Image (cartoon, rainbow, N blue to C red):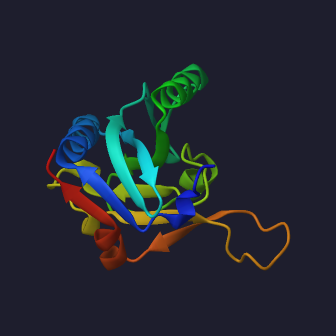
Amino acid sequence: MKVSLTEVTSVMLPRFVVTRTHAQLAATGMRGLEGMALWAGVQEGQLFHVREAIVPQQQGIRSDHGLAVTVPGPELQRINMHLYKSELRLLAQIHSHPTHAFHSETDDEYAIATALGAFSLVVPDFARDPFSIARCATYRLTSLPWWKPGTRPEWKQVDARAAAAIFNIVEG
């Protein structure tokens, strides 16, 4: 039986995953577009080991309403098959914003990481600065308020200090 991602209290995040993710976001940002990546790995109770950064095929969108990034359906299917065959779980989605980091209504409605307990990190300023968990806006998918029947999951912001305590960047 799989343990729920809601149990995760500590994430081991290899520096090479951070480097790959940040490079993707910064390169896309240099073109004036939002970029995204996914973090996948294995869970051991309350500990999650990120094993890889998945950089999906994506389309940056610039319109009168702002910026967005989308991943086509066939690519989502390919990622799901990869996760299944590799016996990995999707822990987090990471994407960039042009200025300050926050979770928009679009981010809420069109998330790729949809398991309760999953994380969504938003990197500010098109990832121009060195990566820092503390500078990201970090959100976690929760079912609060849990006492109300039919409650829909929602993204709840994680305090920057708490996020920095959860995500441990490690060598290797």
Residue 141's place in the image compared with 55, above or below, is: below
Q: Quadrant of the C terminus?
A: top left
Residue 146, quarter of picture: bottom right
- Reply above or below: 42 against 87: below
- Number of labelled discs? 0
The percent position of residue 61, horizontal first and vertical second, equals: 46, 35
Q: Is residue 94 visible?
A: yes
Left or right side of 77 for 48: left
Q: Position of residue 156 (x, y in %)?
A: 54, 70
Name above or below for residue 37 compared with residue 10: above
Pick whichever, 34 or 85, lies toward us.
85
Kindly identify the residue that appears in the image at 64 percent across and 65 percent down.
Answer: 154
Q: Name the image quarter holding residue 26.
A: top left
Residue depicted at 33% across the width and 38% down the height: 53
Relative placement, left or right, of 148 versus 171 is: right
Residue 80 falls left or right of residue 134: right
Q: Which residue is rendered at x = 51% and y = 31% of the image?
A: 71
Residue 67 appears in the figure: no
Q: Is residue 31 above or below residue 13?
A: above
List x then y, in percent, for residue 5: 54, 58
Q: Residue furthest front?
A: 1
Single out the residue that lies furthest toward the right: 149
Kindly indicate the quadrant of the structure image that contains residue 27.
top left
Where residue 115 appears, x then y in whole percent? 60, 52
